[in-house]
Amino acid sequence: MGEIIPYDKRQGVIWMNGEFVDWADANIHVLTHGLHYGSCVFEGERAYDGAIFKSREHSERLQRSAEMLGFELPYTVDEIEAAKHETLKRMGLDNAYVRAVAWRGSGQMGVAAKKAGINVAIAIWEWGDYFADKMKGIRITISDWKRPQPDSAPVKAKAAGLYMICTLSKHAAEAQGYADALMYDYKGRVAELTGAHIFFVKDGELHTPTNDILLDGITRATVLDLAARRKIKVRQRDIMPEEMKDFTECFVVGTAAEVTPVREIKGIEFTPGDVTRALVEDYDKLVRRQLVTEPAE
Ligand SMILES: Cc1ncc(COP(=O)(O)O)c(C=O)c1O
């Protein structure tokens, strides 16, 4: 793997609070509320062939996440949309990762920070596959951390604070040679990965965890549509860990992961088969606008 250029040492422009600034100048003060107290929400999006996939859905989710953390974005969804598209154009990229982020600023320090000020930024960079050897199928382990219960945190927000356990989980997984970690939830159910949702296949049917405490995944919803178009039956239900050995195929989905086959979950093996392959292909065609989407019957 090539050397990673530090993210603060890259070239280009970043949209920050309504204007374009040089990449190197998109800085914040060390006394920023979002940094100290986790008052920060964000989006991860991908552009394919010059168009951001499901861009508006992402901007709307950013707005909802901010509301769940008790603040209002100082820009409308339309303004964020325009800023993202202009940033993509100015960066001269066709295939890229899009990061929109909103946070409480440095106007006030302390737990209460209504006057801290709200900031929004958009950065876009070139990006490839999230998982190395994606199509071979990834190996994942089980995290020691559990997704929190809905009265412990705003679990539906794509909020920075919720990623603390994801970073711990992913680092522990990588230290053991796995690509990622599957997290159970506070009830012990199979939940999601550190940045993706999970699907299983048995007898040609899809099984995926109930969405009550999971992030409302944009890729998850897309894959559910694609499955409906193929008339693949989907069971959204509580899945307990002891059931995993009964599934034949497994794959994970997310903006970054796209549709990635799984070949092992900590000793339980899966063989990517027809259902996984079909959805990998459909998703790829859809994001590249080679699949006409009409509502599924
Ligand atoms: C914890 C978690 N689950 C699932 C996903 C997948 O969501 P989406 O398909 O909206 O990217 C993400 C990525 O945003 C995530 O961070």
Image (cartoon, rainbow, N blue to C red):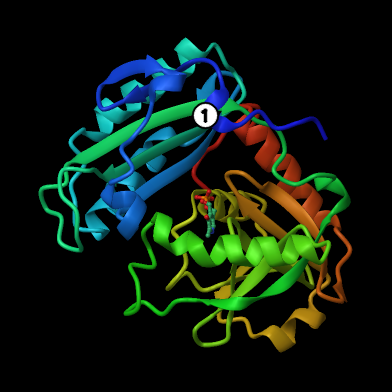
| Residue occupying image coordinates x 31% and y 59% | 37
> Quarter-wise, where is residue 110 in the image?
bottom left
Q: Secondary structure at mark 1?
A: helix
The answer to whether 130 is drawn above or below residue 85 in the figure is below
Q: Left or right of 82: which side holds 110?
A: left
| Residue occupying image coordinates x 20% and y 63% | 111
Q: Left or right of 53: which side holds 202?
A: right
| Residue occupying image coordinates x 85% and y 76% | 268
In the rendering, at what x and y percent does residue 254 appear? 59, 50
The answer to whether 38 is drawn above or below residue 46 in the figure is below
In the rendering, at what x and y percent does residue 226 appear? 61, 49
Q: Left or right of 48: which side holds 158?
A: left
Front residue of 19/22: it is 22
| Residue occupying image coordinates x 35% and y 32% | 121
The answer to whether 16 is drawn above or below residue 181 in the figure is above
Q: Quadrant of the N terminus?
A: top right
> Quarter-wise, where is residue 234 in the image?
bottom right
Residue 233, visible in the rendered structure: no
Q: Amino acid at mark 1?
A: Asp
> Quarter-wise, where is residue 107 in the image?
top left
Q: Left or right of 232: which side holds 117?
A: left
Front residue of 80/2: it is 2
